[in-house]
Image (cartoon, helix red, strand yellow):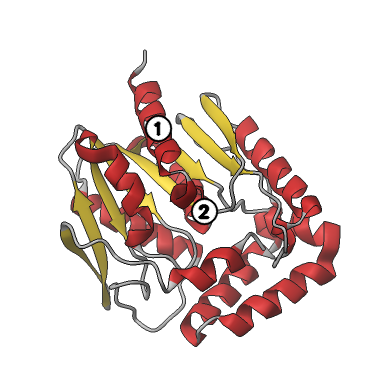
Amino acid sequence: MLALGLWCAAAAQAAEAPAGERTVQRAGYRLQAQQQGQGPVAVVFESGFGQGAGAWKQVVAELGADCDCIAYARAGLGGSGSDGRPKRIEEHLQDLEAVMDRLAPHRKVVLVGHSYGGLLASEFARRHPQRLLGLVLVDPTTLDQRHAFKRADRARVLADDQALLAMLPPPMAADYRLLVEQLDSADAAVPRAPADVPVVLMTSTQVAAEPFVLEETAPGKAIWKRQHAQLFAGFARGEHRYFATGHNIHREDPKAVAAAVRTVAALAAAP
């Protein structure tokens, strides 16, 4: 599923930026967030699976004083607490809404999501388009991608799952199993119309020299690009940009992600 292996191994090493610490109280735990800058455009960052707020520090630095940047760690990651239960997609969306309510009240935001965070951003936009100026989707997961990958090579997808689970600490493994359960469901394969908001969709094209998971192979990358093309086709406004990088575009090319934020803000401001 996705390129989870790429960033799961690195996730625990992602340093959290010290600036502008904030907390968001939830039932049974607190979310750790970082807020930096006082620019006119509020930007909320949703990280990939296993990553905390520090994953965005280079992008935040590129945006500088132009934006009010808000990054946070989902429950159980970084400095965020947990109630001990793995969270479903819907629960993560509720936490994201709480972060916006607490740190960007009464403001429309540019929502930036990477990988699993991109799936959350897309789903949040479908439910709450009135909260957003637009979306930046950084090599996002799509709801029906596991169905597409399993049609191509079911045995490889299941083997990748086992390899990933063997690497993950128990709480993150529980999160992964629950996510797989949701993405394997029949409901995940049902087509959904995206939100009518401006978008920049960023797709990685690099095939790994030594692929760890199916998504890093040439056939897997072809499926990945088709998934993103189908996702982008549903939006009425925006741009689809391709990058000769690995999955972590925001780390390899933070200037490009900052540029995408500015593009979405400009599209939202246009008549």
User: Dot 1, crowdedness within 10 Å: few (<14), some or many (≥20)?
Assistant: some
| Disc 1 secondary structure class | helix
Instruction: Report the disc number at residue 248.
Output: 2
Please tell me in which quadrant of the rendered image residue 22 appears.
bottom left
| Residue in the picture at 18% in, 58% down | 19
Residue shown at 45% from the left, 31% from the top: 197
Q: Please state which amino acid type lies under the numbered disc 2.
A: Asn
> Which residue corresponds to mark 1?
259
| Figure check: 167 above or below 157 | below
Give the number of the disc on residue 85.
none
Residue 193: x and y, percent? 59, 38
User: Where's the C terminus, which quadrant?
Assistant: top left
Q: Position of residue 190 (x, y in %)?
A: 69, 50
Dots 2 and 1: beta carbons under 8 Å? no
> Mark 2 falls on what kind of element?
loop
Q: Is residue 238 left or right of residue 132?
A: right
Looking at the picture, which amino acid does disc 1 mark? Ala
